[in-house]
Image (cartoon, helix red, strand yellow):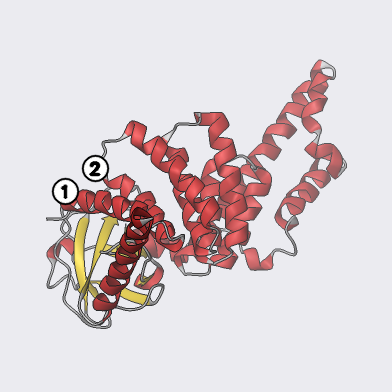
Amino acid sequence: MRSFFWTIFLALAVFFCHDLALAQNRGTVIQITLNVTDLNKKPVKGIVLSNKAGGAQSGKTNGSGITIIELPNPPEPHAPIYLQLVSEEEIKTNKGWAIYYPYEGKAYMPYGSDPPFIEVILIKEIDLEYIKNHSSISIEGTPNKEGQRQSILSKTTKETELDSNEIVKEKSLLNVETKEKEKSFNLSQDLDDRIAGIINDALRWGRSYYAKGKYQEAAIAYRKALELKPDDIRIITELGLALTRAEDYNAAEQIYERSVSIKEKQLGPDHLDLATDHVTLASLYYRQGKYSEAEDHCKKALNIRGQLLEPDHLDLLGPLEIYASLLWKRHREHEAVEIEVHIKAIRAKYIQ
C-alpha cells in the first residue's frame, strides 16, 4: 500500500515540476532553435535572423543550419512569431537570400519540449521573384475543375473530328489497321503532351499562390494537377503542405494517408520518405487532439528512422518532440521525461 502512494506522489511531483518550469519560462527569456535549409533541404550556413517584434539577433547558423534565437516575454503556444533576415549590410552571408517558409516570416510558437524548434526554408531572391511573377495560365479564369482539360479536348475534337470521349480513350485505337495505328499514336502523343502542359501550369500556379500565402488557392491548383496524375508523390506532397498551411487538417490527413499508401507500395514499408509522412500525420493528429493516432504515427516514424539513423541524429528530434508533448497530454509523465532526456542529448550535440 505504501509503495502505491509513493508511486502516485512521484508522478504528481514530476507533473507539477513540468508545469512549474513552463510557468517560469513565461516570465523570462526563451530560446528557440531554428533549423535553416534551402528548398532542397540542404543546411544554409552563416545565416542570421531576428524577431521583428524585438529581441536579440540569432547567432550565425552552423554547418548543420542550426542556430538559436532568444525571445523576451515568451509567447503562448501557437502565438505568431515574426522572423526576418538581418540586413545584408550587417550580415554579408545573408545576401541574396529570402525567407520562403514560413510565409513572410510568420511562424508560430511551437508546442513540444524546451527549447522550441522552428524550421525555416530559404530561397534565392531571384527565384522567389520568378515564382511570384511568372506563369502561363490563369486559374481564376477556369470555369470549373475540368475547364482547362475540357478546353484541350474541345480543341482536339475540332482538329480530329473525334468525339471528346473518343479522344480520352484513343489509345485503344492502336489496335486498328496500320494506317489507323499511326494516326491514333500521333493523336495520343499530342494529347499526352497537352495534358502534361496543363499539369505543369497548375503546379506553377500552385507554387505561386503558396509563395504568396494563398494556401486555399494553391490547394485548388494542386488538386487540378492531381486529377490528371493521381499517384504523383510530388504533387501529393505539395497539396498536403498547402492544406496544412490552410489549416484544413482533415483534408491534409487524407492526402498524407494516401501518400503513405502509395509510398509503401513504391518504396517499401521502411523507407525514410515514409517516416517523413508519419511525422507529418503525427503533427496533424496532435493539433486536433487525436493523441492515440498521433502516437501511432510517432512510433512508426521513430521505428523507421531508428533503424536507419544514429540514435542522436537530428531527424529524430521532430517525432520525439511530438511524442513527448502527447505523453504529457495523456498524463504519462515518466515516459515523457525519458523522451525529453533523449531530446536534450540530441540538442546538446548539434547546438553549440
In this orientation, which residue lies closer to the viewer: 197 or 109? 109
Tell me the residue at 46%/69% (across/down): 212
Determine whether the residue tagged by mark 1 lies in a helix, strand or loop. Answer: helix
Badge 1 or badge 2: first in the primary sequence: 2
- Please give the name of the residue rendered at 67% of the width and 37% of the height, measured from the top-left corner: 192
Dot 1 amino acid type: Lys
Rounded to the nearest angstrom, the CA distance separating label 1 from label 2 is 8 Å
Q: Mark 1 points at which residue?
A: 349
301 sits left or right of 223 in the view: left
Label 1 crowd (10 A; few <14 / some 14-19 / many >=20): few
From the top left corner, tell me how far across and down residue 262 is, in percent: 58, 37
Amino acid on which the number 2 mark rests in the picture: Asp
Task: State the image coordinates of residue 95 (x, y, percent, origin top left).
Answer: 20, 64
Q: Quadrant of the C terminus?
A: bottom left
The image's mark for residue 48 is none
Q: In which quarter of the image is residue 12?
A: bottom left
Query: Looking at this view, is 218 or 3 the one in front?
Result: 3
The residue lying furthest to the front in this view is: 1
Number of the label disc, if any, that sits on residue 312: 2
Is residue 240 at all visible to an observer of this figure?
yes
Left or right, 258 with reference to 301: right
Is residue 198 among the parts visible in the rendering?
Answer: no
Quarter placement of the N terminus: bottom left
Contact (CB < 8 A) between labels 1 and 2?
Answer: yes
Where residue 45 appears, x then y in whole percent?
A: 18, 54
Circle 2 Cα neighbour tier, 10 Å, few/some/many (<14 / 14–19 / ≥20): some
Residue 45 is left or right of residue 3, and the answer is left
Q: Residue 206 vs residue 185: left or right?
A: left
In the image, residue 55 above or below residue 350: below
